[in-house]
């Protein structure tokens, strides 16, 4: 039997990250095949957007329940992750039997509910195993989330001529592999808190809301989330439309899907890792502010490249893909540093619940706006979030409590 003595923090981080990549592949599985679903169910742009937004809504519902019950702080984190991932894989696979948009939306919502037991809980696991290099560790985890979220694009590209159901089934199978890693290969951290959980969940929530520094980190995260998932959801469609406008005709579906994987997955993973490394060296507020400023500028300017040479769209997309998620891990890391240990699970779940609620608005806003003013200007609306996020993080930098972040590097 594998014991804790054989596990270094880096080995644990590796296992958690791989499991996260595999499990999060169910998140965008239906979104990647939305073109097929749009034709099958005769959907409009708003209904297509709601397929992705319904996952976000399910996540919010699950996160609220988790916050109220304090489940993330009361039960064994590995088993929460494992059971939630099994549930997510199951309802994701059931999607192939959907016979209407309404049933599909319900199943996507249940997938989002299940993911509450995966991502926030994985952050908690990582912070338990890597207390001294949280920025780097959580950065690696968010890089895993980014790759996992983009993985359906790669699955679709490889099997571009396969039925759309294959993407759903493969992603569910990968999620079950992730369950096996966490359930059978990863031991419990010897210092995991198993006793004295908060007796009243409202106490946990009041503690989080009263923590001014932690809330400033949350406000920065909320601005970041306004941009992130709307960009991830609609960027491949933007690339497809831009290439068609430029005059490309051959292989546009496959090429736009692969570019989506490279920009969202590969560039995003690089950005997450780099953001974590730099944040531990120069500070969380510095890295998040720079990343959000650059990503906000990309949102403002990428429309200028619409219909232009593909290499220009790809180049701006890569910069955007790196910076749009380079800051993501640091908001979670900051909250774990600014919150007392007994309430970390609740604080992370609350942060992600509100953040994902915001994404529902921005994802569907782009669906509406692109039909009114066109792709050339649609993404400019996303720049508001990161610019407001920069303001929040500069306020946090000036807060006295910020000295506890990144060993005093703010």
Image (cartoon, helix red, strand yellow):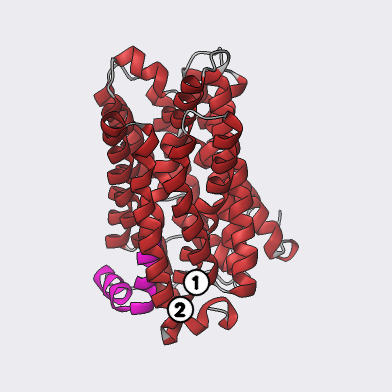
Instruction: Answer whether residue 246 is visible to the viewer in this image.
Output: yes
Measured as percent of width and height from the top left, residue 409 is found at 57, 79
Magenta: predominant secondary structure element?
helix
Relative to 402, is 158 above or below? Answer: above
Q: Residue furthest bottom?
A: 400
Measured as percent of width and height from the top left, residue 133 is found at 63, 70
Circle 1: element type: helix
Per the image, the residue denoted by label 1 is: 285
Relative to 363, is 281 above or below? Answer: below
Magenta stretch holds residue 204: yes
Q: Which of 58 and 320 is in front in this view?
A: 320
* Span of residues in magenta: 201-221
Q: Which residue is drawn at 47% across and 59% down?
A: 292
State how far apart marks 2 and 1 are (Cα). Answer: 6 Å
Q: Which of 266 and 40 is in front in this view?
A: 266
Q: Residue at x 31, y 76 (%)?
A: 207
Of callouts 2 and 1, the N-terminal one: 1
Disc number placed over residue 397 in the picture, else none: 2
Q: Nearer the viewer, residue 48 or 389?
A: 389
């Amino acid at each position: 039997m594998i014991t804790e003595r054989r596990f270094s923090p880096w080995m644990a981080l590796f296992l958690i990250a791989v499991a996260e990549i595999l499990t999060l592949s169910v998140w965008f599985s239906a979104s990647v095949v939305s073109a097929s679903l749009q034709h099958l169910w005769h959907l409009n742009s708003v209904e297509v957007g709601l397929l992705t937004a319904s996952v976000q809504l399910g996540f919010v519902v699950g996160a609220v329940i988790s916050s109220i019950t304090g489940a993330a702080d009361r039960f064994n984190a590995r088993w929460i992750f494992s059971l939630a991932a099994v549930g997510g894989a199951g309802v994701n696979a059931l999607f192939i039997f959907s016979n209407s948009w309404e049933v599909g939306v319900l199943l996507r919502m249940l997938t989002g509910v299940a993911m509450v037991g995966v991502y926030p809980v994985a952050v908690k696991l990582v912070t338990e195993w890597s207390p001294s290099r949280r920025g780097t560790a959580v950065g690696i985890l968010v890089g895993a989330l980014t790759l996992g979220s983009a993985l359906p694009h790669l699955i679709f590209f490889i099997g571009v001529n396969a039925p759309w159901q294959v993407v759903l089934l493969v992603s569910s199978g990968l999620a079950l592999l992730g369950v096996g890693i966490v359930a059978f290969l990863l031991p419990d951290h010897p210092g995991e808190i198993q006793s004295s959980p908060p007796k009243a969940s409202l106490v946990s929530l009041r503690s989080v809301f009263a923590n001014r520094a932690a809330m400033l980190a949350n406000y920065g995260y909320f601005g970041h989330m306004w941009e992130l998932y709307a960009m991830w959801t609609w960027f491949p469609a933007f690339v497809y439309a831009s290439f068609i406008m430029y005059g490309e005709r051959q292989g546009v579906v496959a090429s736009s899907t692969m570019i989506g994987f490279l920009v969202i997955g590969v560039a995003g993973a690089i950005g997450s890792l780099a953001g974590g490394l730099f944040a531990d060296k120069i500070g969380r507020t510095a890295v998040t502010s720079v990343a959000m400023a650059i990503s906000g500028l990309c949102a403002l300017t990428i429309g200028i490249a619409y219909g232009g040479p593909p290499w220009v769209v790809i180049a701006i997309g890569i910069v955007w893909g790196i910076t749009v998620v380079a800051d993501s891990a640091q908001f979670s890391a900051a909250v774990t540093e600014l919150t007392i240990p007994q309430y970390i699970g609740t604080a992370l779940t609350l942060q992600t619940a509100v953040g994902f609620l915001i994404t529902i608005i921005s994802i569907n806003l782009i669906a509406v706006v692109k039909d009114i003013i066109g792709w050339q200007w649609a993404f400019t609306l996303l720049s508001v979030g990161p610019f407001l996020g920069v303001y929040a993080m500069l306020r946090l930098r000036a807060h006295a409590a910020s000295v506890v972040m990144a060993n005093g590097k703010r």
